[in-house]
Amino acid sequence: MDSADRTSSGLNGFSVVQPETRRAHKNCPAAMQTSYDFFPSQPQLCPDNPDERHMVLCPAMAAHLRPAELSAANAVVDLPPCPQCDNNDTRDELFHDMFSYTPVPTLLLNADLRVAHVSESYCHVAGVSDREQLLGCHIDDLCDKVPVPSRALATEGIRTARDSASPSSLDESLGGAIWTLRTVPVVRNGEARCFLMELQDNTEARRHQLELEERLYANETFKILVETVRDYAIFMLDPQGNVATWNAGAESFKGYRKSEIIGKHFSNFYSQEDRDNDKPGRELRDALRDGRCEDEGWRYRKDGSRFWSVRSRCSLGPYARS
């Protein structure tokens, strides 16, 4: 709406009321009006004083009025910010807090790769006491000042993110620590407007991963060793006494193929007399309770022939190994 429209809409002769006046004119619909985005098209009378007319005007509206228009009103006073102004202030504050106080060390680079914002957590990691020292720095110059990220890591992260138009994640070992740099490009109309860079110290996570890989490798090596041994019958039982694993030595000694015995109860290797006396059950319970059970006696092959066995059965977690 131009100035002529505003004046013809009835601005002349209106009082722009301040909060105290609005409270005093509690019966005046114009004075109590809470919508700030339009001008009343018709004069609104105050019930307390029929000769007095009012309209509510916030600073955002007053900024668009020319001096001549302001002088046309009986009085122009400062009013509290309108809801839209409050929302803008809140958004700015949230934006500032989000980048300043995030626990993830964060840098925000503009399109020219200069630091537009930096978090306190990054300053702590970089050993910088005053963030103002970093603002405006080109990423190359910043990498020369701080230990992380290195220039090579930052350059590669930005290049990858820009080329793919998607977040990139790269690892680097610096000073005995493993750092992960996540670079997020913010693209608008096909152009990168800024880059969000986040650092994460993954030293402990990497250490746990290496330990897990070593255990898996050891387990796999042990598995291969056990499966290829032919001089000893080595197999594992579950807590109920069912055969869980079966090596080549067990197949050679007992005559059962793996597909025939896996899932079957190990009491199949005992005589009927031992089974009737629950000898297999007692030995399994002893092994699970004490962690070890040694026994020797006659054991039976698949074809019914018997052999004298000296065995040791140990508890391994949820399994018992014979």
Image: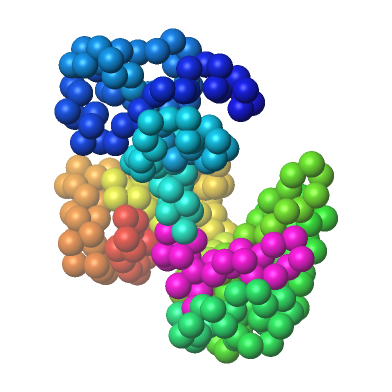
Residue 24 vs 97, above or below: the answer is above
Q: Nearer the viewer, residue 89 or 75?
A: 75
Does the magenta portion include 114? yes
Residue 111 vs 264, above or below: the answer is below
Q: Does residue 59 appear anywhere in the picture? A: yes
Work out which quarter of the rendered image holds the C terminus and state it.
bottom left
Work out which quarter of the rendered image holds the N terminus and state it.
top right
**Measuring 48% from the left and 35% from the top, which residue is drawn there?**
70
Q: Nearer the viewer, residue 316 or 287?
A: 316
Indicate the position of residue 270 as horizontal and vertical percent values: 32, 50
Indicate the position of residue 278 as horizontal and vertical percent values: 19, 47
Q: Does residue 229 appear anywhere in the picture? A: no
Q: Nearer the viewer, residue 290 or 298?
A: 290
Number of labels in the image equals 0
Q: Nearer the viewer, residue 203 or 53?
A: 53
**Measuring 42% from the left and 54% from the top, which residue is drawn there?**
93
Residue 292 vs 270, above or below: the answer is below
Indicate the position of residue 120 as horizontal and vertical percent values: 45, 72
**Measuring 60% from the left and 86% from the top, which residue is drawn there?**
147
**Measuring 82% from the left and 55% from the top, which residue is drawn there?**
163
Which stretch did the figure color magenta? 97-123
Would you say 60 lies left or right of 239 here?
Answer: right
Residue 310 falls in image quadrant: bottom left
Residue 190 falls in image quadrant: top right
Residue 86 falls in image quadrant: top left
In this picture the colour scheme is rainbow
Does the magenta portion include 21? no
Would you say 179 lies left or right of 139 here?
Answer: left
